[in-house]
Image (spheres, rainbow, N blue to C red):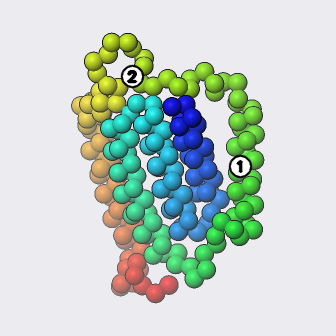
Amino acid sequence: MLYLEVLFMQGLLLGLVVVASNPSPYFAALGLVVVSGMGCGLMITCGGTFLSLILFLIYLGGMLVVFAYSSALASEVHPETWGSPRVALNSLIYVVGVLLGVGFFWEGWTGGLGVTVDQVSELSVLRGDLTGVAIMYSSGGGVLVVGAWVLLLTLFVVLEVVRGSSRGALRAV
């Protein structure tokens, strides 16, 4: 299980490097899908099965909207790929930065690996992820409503920004 956690962490860091170093929205959206998949897989290995499924569905829905808007606004004939020199240099700089950070903080990271949410208590009858979801909906209901209104307002603002003169985001760029 520890090997799977390390694999998910490495995939998460690699996806973050792809998102940060690529200026093209097409490949950056693919990097976001990899990041969300690896992050939710990491959450599954720590015992949060239900919450990771919900977050994965929310992330994929949000990324679909972001990808549609960014591809409509930034339609390039020849987008920069991962093999172009500028993107390769940015990726190399980010990977070196991550390796320097790992080397600097290496001593404090080894203590918490391998402990899942269900291994905290011996005879627990509740799962950690399900009680967290129940608390989120009971105590955090107001925050969820405010978050939904903010997302709806953001959707209308983005639609108004990309509307243009008459045809919206489908206009010729």
Residue at point 36%, 70% (across, down): 159
Which percent across, then down, holds residue 21? 65, 59
Residue closest to the eye, 167 or 44: 44
Task: Judge whether 60 appears above or below 41 on screen.
Answer: below
Look at discs 2 and 1 and give the one toward the viewer: 2
Residue at point 35%, 26% (across, down): 128
Which percent across, then down, holds residue 74? 52, 75
Q: Earlier in the sequence, mark 2 or mark 1?
A: 1
Which percent across, then down, holds residue 6? 58, 37
Which percent across, then down, holds residue 51? 35, 38
Image side of residue 119 versus residue 133, left or right: right
Badge 2 is on which residue? 118
What residue type is disc 2 on?
Asp
Badge 1 is on which residue? 95
What residue occupies the far bottom of the structure in this picture? 172
Q: Quadrant of residue 53?
A: top left
